[in-house]
Image: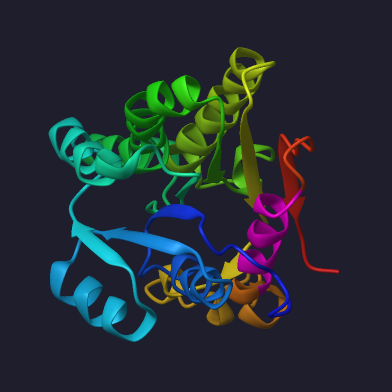
Amino acid sequence: MGSSVDLAGQRVLLVGATGGIGSPLARRLADAGADLVLVARREGQLRSFAQDVGGRTLAGDCTDSAFVDRLRDHVETDGPPDVLIHAAGSFDLAPIAETDPAVFRRLVDSNLLGPFLLMRAFLPGMLAAGTGHVVTVGSVAGRVAFPGNGGYSAGKFGVRGLHAVLEQELRGTGVRCSLVEPAATDTPIWDPLDPDRRDDLPPRSAMLSAEAVADAIMFVITRPPQVQIPAVAVQRS
């Protein structure tokens, strides 16, 4: 995605801004001139990142409805965002029979409840304005079943269904929604698993780069207002 992309005057709320996909995406948005509000859980890391990239910040957990309400109040002092991007989430691997219920809940909360709470908070303002774009980063694991992905796929399959309903509800409103579903992407979430030493996981050299996924998201949000891209699967060529 080249520097010719112009998002000047566009207010973009990016959740998961310091994550593996969120950080290169934040840089591309900033380079395109977007007015950024950056959200992540770790306040110190977020503030340091924002000093480099620019934009306003609010640290917190978007699986917490009280925080999401506070985020809405913080952002909507100037009206609803033009673009809302949820690029946060969590990942873990274990057979279903060996998955701790607390881990399962965390995976579903971060990958499904968080996007839902953000939609619920910001859609009323977007609908009243008759414009806006809701973008959620899903996963190939929301379309294809892989062993060990019970908790993760429950969240990602769920968010795919949530977006399918949202697409129907937004028809004719002027508000758009898009689900971006990348294949395995080389980010720090793989560090504890060391996929290069395992036969059941793709090597990092075969994964997408986080920058490539960020470019795909930039493509989606920079289409003309009359163009809707409900879902896009991103894979390594």
Specify whether residue 112 is painted magenta. no
Q: Position of residue 157 (x, y in %)?
A: 56, 32
Q: How many marks?
A: 0
Compared across the picture, whether 133 is left or right of 129 comes to right
Q: Position of residue 184 (x, y in %)?
A: 63, 62
The residue positioned 27% from the left and 60% from the top of the image is 40
Q: Position of residue 42 (x, y in %)?
A: 18, 66
* Camera sees residue 225: yes
Residue 2 position by quadrant = bottom right
Compared across the picture, whether 38 is left or right of 87 comes to left
The residue positioned 56% from the left and 74% from the top of the image is 28
Q: Position of residue 60 (x, y in %)?
A: 18, 52
Specify whether residue 215 is painted magenta. yes
* Camera sees residue 87: no
Image quadrant where one finds the N terminus: bottom right
Is residue 152 placed above or below 90 in the rendered structure? above
Is residue 35 placed above or below 188 in the rendered structure? above
Give whichever of 138, 99 is nearer the camera.
138
Is residue 62 placed above or below 207 in the rendered structure? above
Q: Give the overall secondary structure of the magenta segment.
A: helix
The residue positioned 78% from the left and 67% from the top of the image is 236
Give whichever of 125, 59 is nearer the camera.
125
Give whichever of 120, 92 is nearer the camera.
120
Image quadrant where one finds the C terminus: bottom right
Q: What's drawn in magenta, residue-wise?
A: 212-223
Residue 206 position by quadrant = bottom right
Q: Given the current orientation, which residue lies at the most extreme bottom position?
A: 52
The residue positioned 61% from the left and 45% from the top of the image is 141
